[in-house]
Amino acid sequence: MTTLQDLLGIDLPVIQAPMAGVQGSALAIAVSNAGGLGSLPCALLDVDGVRAELGAIRAQTARPFNVNFFCHRPPQADAERDARWRAALAPYFAEYGIDADAIPAGPSRSPFSREAADVLADFKPAVVSFHFGLPAEDLLARVRGWGAKILSSATTVDEARWLEARGVDAIIAQGIEAGGHRGSFLSDDIGIQLGTFALLPQVVDAVKIPVIAAGGIADARGVAAAIALGASGVQVGTAYLLSPEAATSAVHRAALKTDAARTTALTNVFTGRPARAIVNRLVKELGPLSSAAPAFPLAATAVAPLRARAEGQGRADFSPLWAGQNTRGCREVAAAVITRELASGIEGP
């Protein structure tokens, strides 16, 4: 059977999870150069930003790397729902002296597009991954056209089967413990989503392609457990958040070093879609799941000025402190060290 290393052209079956907002090319470069698969998140980048970051990666590594995109359907504007959300945030706007009427409406994250595919075609990355399903077939065909391997996240067995039927090369089984956005796309019911070590063997049994375990894996022991349950490799994000190569903000780094990091929740108050983060003021007071929050990704627009004002005062009250349930692997050490230590959980060659 083809190993994940052979499939992706890497030495170690460790994928650094793409983490939009807390990393750029530097972390991806460090992990790829260490023998794993570094990942560049592109959800918050425009096409010029994608091009610049890909140029930086190409200049600093000859190793394979992954480029990640969201592929959600942009929501229809809903003035009434947006007004309800801004009304819920009104006390905070008043507290910080922010004019709510001056905050523009609009998305903060864009799905994979033809323009993005045009940029990728110039660089031809070895791996392209998607969150929230897959893009339109014509866009997917373009990516396959230069030989890129396709990865996507599944939060249920049904999603894994759906992805396999559409020809992905490997599936990321994302357990409920994982930090950041849930990759779900066939159902919004969080109640049917499982923990990593319940989901993983079920997906392994259901599909014939390699399965990558994600969620709650923070050290070599977690990696060994995932491999024992049939994973071909692991995807790890939270453990890299304190590495010097990550772009994690000062308030986010501070939170990860306190007992607060032990309490995370799935919340939609930052973007409009369930994502796991450290519980802070906004999550406690308006969430964790708020019916007032606009559809993803529109909720983020009104929260952005609050976040900026609070972070300017050294506070994380309105910041999305993305983190998985297992933060014990967070250490201020180089990403290469983290990658090699994770891989030490795999016995044999």
Image: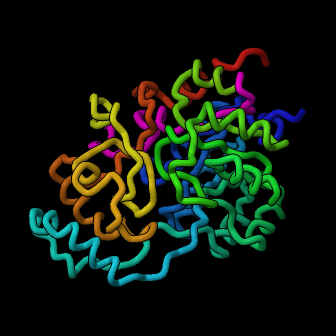
Figure colour scheme: rainbow
Question: Is 28 on the left-hand or right-hand side of 148?
Answer: left
Q: Note whether 219 is above or below 280 in the view shown.
A: above
Q: Which residue is drawn at 61% across and 55% down?
A: 68
Residue at the extreme right: 1
Check residue 59 for magenta coloring: no
Q: Residue at x 43, y 82 (%)?
A: 77
Question: Which quarter of the figure is the C terminus placed in?
Answer: top right
Q: In the rendering, at what x and y percent does residue 229 appear?
A: 71, 26
Question: Which quarter of the figure is the N terminus placed in?
Answer: top right
Q: Residue at x 35, y 65 (%)?
A: 291
Q: In the rendering, at what x and y percent does residue 156 appear?
A: 65, 48
Specify whether residue 317 is in view: no
Q: Which of 284 and 14 lies nearest the eye of the viewer?
A: 284
Residue at the extreme front: 191
Check residue 239 for magenta coloring: yes
Specify whether residue 207 is in view: yes
Give the extent of the magenta segment: 228-253
Q: Note whether 50 is above or below 229 in the view shown.
A: below
Q: In the rendering, at what x and y percent does residue 55 appear?
A: 61, 57
